[in-house]
Image (cartoon, grey):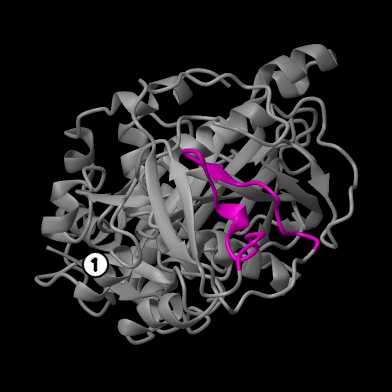
Amino acid sequence: MVQVTTRRQRANPLRHMCLRDGLASLGTCTLMVVLYASDATGPWLRQLRTAGNDNSGTVSPLLNRTNDSDISVTKASKVPPIELSYKKPSCIPPRSPHALQEFVVLGVNLAQYGYESGHEAGQVVTVSMDQPYLLYEDFDIADQLMASKRWMQSMHIPKPEAMFLLYKHELDAIIAKTSKAAPGISLERQEYRAILRLLPRKKSFVAKPTNRACSSGVWVVKYDSKEDKTLMGYGGSYLETPYDDKAIAKRLSGDLNRVDDNCGDWAMDQVKAGFVIEERFSAFDSDDKPAVEFKVFTIWGRVWLANWRRGNRRPGLVHRNGTVVEWTGKDTDSLPDWVNWDRVVEVAERLARHKDMYRVDVFVGLPSDHPALKSTSRAAQMAAVQIRVSETEFVPSTHLKDPALFEEASRLWKAGYKMGIHKLIPNDEVPKAFLEKGFLSEEDAEALAVDDHFAPIRVKN
């Protein structure tokens, strides 16, 4: 069975209490959950998800935009509208510069929640919706980096190519089979030696542990074939340190055996240890520049906002319709012409189906060894640009400068529950093998049936 545990070691009823008694902050008690294999199901989650009206719902049709959208949608067959009734809340902060006027999911404008004109606090409000939002009755494996990456690989979801995906227990099994008995040498030392042998030579890559948080433990390596020189950076630092494979192997093997070192993140301390080595993404026109990354927040299956990043730069925030604003909410520069924003939205919303909140991290650029990086034709480089999913999370887990941003996201998230737009359905996305074992082996991942829902995002860039 599945147990949902609070991500910051908060008591299970707290999330339900936040939902019931007031506007919760996404940075504190809401959405801080993680899935683990267990023998008991957390009943508090069902309480939370059945709060409010019992009319419940489905993922919004892909790219069903209402704010300055020009993307067509395949509409579902005509069904009678569903009437939802709820009470206007009494505790809603004044509108911030980030508050939306429209955030429509299946015909219901969640952005009106708390600001309904013509109604006093406590009065019943009635709205109509097209059909319920089908919401998974429990969460998924997004926070389990290893299982998530293997699952995406099996679904053929576009992501950076993995060179190695190994749990600690899988690495230890390889060591036991291939290494001679080594009396007096600790297992961690043997893991260090094994990782050292696995690290690529004369190749750009990213290496990171699966059980660390706060962007710690991530190594970025850049190989310059012209100068036959390799540089590296750690934890977000610049690529300026001469390559030291022993330092990387030592840190990764240490992380495999590290606990209680995740910025107070209790849930991450429970994740099965492992490590990932995958290709490094860079800008489409230069391997010396970092790729564009969007941390895309979806609420009720719909893109709410994206945190636009490029290395250590934070150019701004991007709304679903492609409008870019500064952190203050004022308009700023537009997206580069080589960023296919509609495609970013499509990928994020395909992955966000049946979830109340989901974060999809997307790279826009090229693998560091792509031939187009050596081209002198900008048109050829732009044509080669790829969109790849770096990772996914069902918690915010990223820093947003203005607390009002999380308050607005929390309002929209809470609105879906309070207005009663959802209908619980079994989660058929989490592999059965993961629930039974608590991890997803390579063999179990390869045996998964490919979900046709993801077909539209597999091939196109």
Q: Is residue 73 left or right of residue 114?
A: left
Question: Count of labels shown?
Answer: 1
Which range is magenta? 97-119
Q: Main secondary structure of the magenta part?
A: loop
Q: Which quadrant: the C terminus?
A: top right
Q: Is residue 106 magenta?
A: yes
Q: Residue at x 46, y 18 (%)?
A: 74
* Mark 1, residue position: 46
| Pick the front one: 6 or 186 | 6
Query: How far from the left and from the top, in percent, is residue 402?
Result: 75, 70
Q: Is residue 396 left or right of residue 435?
A: right
| Pick the front one: 379 or 88 | 88
When the figure is inspected, residue 162 is found, relative to residue 262, above or below; the finding is above
Residue type marked 1: Arg
When the figure is inspected, residue 253 is found, relative to residue 380, above or below; the finding is below
Looking at the rendered structure, the secondary structure element under dot 1 is helix
Q: Residue at x 74, y 54 (%)?
A: 239
Q: Is residue 341 magenta?
A: no
Query: How far from the left and from the top, in percent, is residue 382?
Result: 75, 19
How packed is label 1: few (under 14 Cα within 10 Å), some, or many (20 or more)?
some
Q: Is residue 84 left or right of residue 101?
A: left
Query: How far from the left and from the top, in percent, is residue 378?
Result: 84, 17
Rendering quarter of residue 374:
top right
Q: Which quadrant: the N terminus?
A: bottom left
Rendering quarter of residue 154:
top left
Can residue 259 be seen here? no
When the figure is inspected, residue 228 is found, relative to residue 93, above or below; the finding is above
Q: Residue at x 43, y 41 (%)?
A: 129
Q: Is residue 292 left or right of residue 417?
A: right
Query: How far from the left and from the top, in percent, is residue 199?
Result: 47, 49
